[in-house]
Image (tube, grey):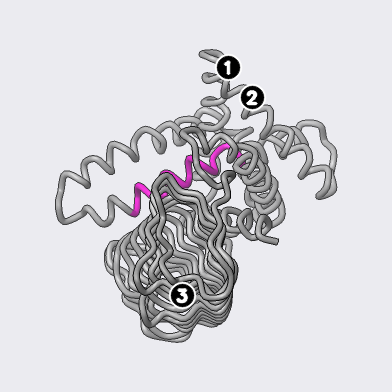
């Protein structure tokens, strides 16, 4: 169960980012509430999913679906019926979230009530004294500080941890540096290069640990005892064992993204492939202008102090578009092949062909010179055609 949820953090969070970018560029083809700009202030009821991004973001009110926030800084004090997703930026969360919270990078302080689980990838996250988390907390790298209450378990892989709050169930730690001064209601399995047990620490059940320093548990272990487990003592090369885990995440992510592209944007990408057939040079030129020109624009905006927040948002969107350019290219090329052969494929075949093309693009992209050139040509022309198609839709909307 834990492995499933740890994999889920990347799958669900990246899919949220994926939809944010698509809505930013293709907002005419999807029904959702999109708020963006240098300043985003909201205090109202949203009856669908919310996507918000900008320099300064302050959100109040309620959201009936998911809420997705990217970049910038501000305060999020929403009542969210489903999931809340935060990417980058500096945010204080006073929200009441009905389901899960996903945090990717950035600096986030959680002071609200989370009805489900919390997934954290990177960044600097503080679970404040007022925070109440009903489910489990999963952390992949980053810096975590816990002062509030976690009713479920806490699972940490990588990074640094300060745990001075309440952990209702088990505590599984695989980190670099850790300081524990709170209450752990379940069993604890602690592995850290540096492990410090505070005077107010309390372990309700047994503890197994391994550390690079001597650890004094004092009288903190109430029911059970603290036992050294040699397998938990970290050596200097512990992270290679994570490669299969990240490989599984990458594979699952690719399968999910290709499914979402085919399922929800199939018609749009089919139109993009038709544009590519008729206007290859224009599409390629647009793609080159986007991938080369936008970084130049971000540098210029960064040089102008008053536009830094906007440049940060552009940087986030540009990075995510780079990530999703190859999958989108694979789907567009699959429709191009289907058009050229004059055949009609069902969804399953369309999905498998686009997935195969993605693998082919991935392999080709690792071939020096010729492979790089072919990949750049395919991605540039396909992505540029998608931008041109999106622009045409906005003009006629």
Relative side of 348 to 148, left or right: right
Question: Which residue is labeled 1 in the image?
Answer: 367
Spot occupied by residue 278 in the image (x, y as percentages of width and height): 61, 33
Residue in front for this viewpoint, 65 or 387: 65
- Which region shows up in magenta? 313-327
Spot occupied by residue 29 in the image (x, y as percentages of width and height): 58, 61
Q: Is label 3 in a helix, a strand or a loop?
A: strand
Which of pointers 2 and 3 indicates the residue nearer the eye? 3
Question: Which residue is labeled 2 in the image?
Answer: 363
Tell me which residue sits at (49%, 66%) in the image.
Answer: 85
Residue in front for this viewpoint, 261 or 199: 199
Is the magenta region chiefly helix, strand or loop?
helix
Tell me which residue sits at (51%, 64%) in the image.
Answer: 102
Q: Is residue 355 above or below residue 66?
A: above
Give the number of the disc on residue 183: 3
**Are the residues flagged by discs 2 and 1 in contact, CB closer than 8 Å?**
yes
Q: Quadrant of the N terminus?
A: bottom right
Q: Is residue 387 above or below residue 106?
A: above
Residue in front for this viewpoint, 395 or 326: 326
Q: Is residue 1 above or below residue 60?
A: above
Q: CA distance from mark 3 to mark 1?
A: 53 Å
């Amino acid at each position: 169960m834990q492995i499933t949820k740890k994999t889920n953090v990347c799958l669900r969070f990246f899919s949220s980012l994926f939809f944010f970018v698509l809505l930013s560029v293709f907002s005419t083809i999807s029904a959702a509430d999109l708020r963006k700009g240098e300043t985003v202030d909201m205090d109202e009821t949203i009856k669908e999913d919310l996507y918000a991004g900008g320099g300064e973001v302050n959100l109040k009110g309620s959201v009936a679906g998911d809420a997705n926030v990217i970049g910038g800084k501000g305060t999020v004090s929403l009542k969210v019926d489903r999931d809340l997703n935060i990417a980058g930026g500096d945010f204080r969360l006073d929200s009441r979230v009905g389901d899960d919270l996903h945090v990717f990078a950035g600096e986030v302080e959680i002071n609200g009530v989370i009805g489900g689980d919390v997934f954290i990838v990177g960044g600097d996250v503080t679970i404040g004294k007022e925070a109440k988390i009903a489910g489990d907390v999963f952390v992949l790298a980053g810096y975590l500080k816990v002062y509030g209450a976690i009713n479920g378990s806490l699972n940490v892989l990588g990074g640094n941890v300060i745990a001075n709050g309440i952990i209702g169930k088990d505590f599984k730690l695989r980190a670099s540096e850790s300081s524990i001064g709170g209450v752990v209601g379940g069993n604890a399995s602690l592995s850290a290069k540096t492990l410090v047990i505070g005077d107010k620490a309390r372990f309700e059940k047994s503890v197994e640990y391994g550390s690079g320093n001597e650890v004094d548990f004092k009288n903190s272990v109430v029911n059970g005892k603290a036992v050294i487990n040699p397998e938990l003592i970290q050596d200097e090369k512990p992270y290679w064992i994570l490669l299969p885990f990240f490989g599984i995440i990458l594979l699952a992510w690719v399968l999910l993204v290709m499914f979402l592209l085919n399922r929800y944007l199939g018609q749009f990408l089919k139109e993009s492939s038709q544009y590519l057939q008729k206007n290859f040079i224009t599409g390629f030129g647009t793609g080159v202008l986007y991938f080369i020109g936008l970084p130049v624009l971000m540098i210029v905006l960064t040089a102008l102090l008053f536009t830094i927040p906007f440049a940060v948002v552009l940087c986030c969107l540009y990075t995510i578009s780079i990530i999703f350019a190859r999958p989108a290219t694979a789907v567009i090329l699959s429709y191009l092949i289907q058009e050229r052969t004059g055949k009609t494929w069902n969804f399953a075949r369309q999905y498998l062909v686009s997935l195969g093309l993605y693998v082919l693009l991935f392999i080709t992209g690792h071939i020096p010179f010729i492979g790089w050139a072919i990949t750049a040509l395919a991605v540039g022309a396909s992505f540029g055609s998608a931008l041109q198609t999106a622009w045409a839709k906005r003009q006629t909307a």
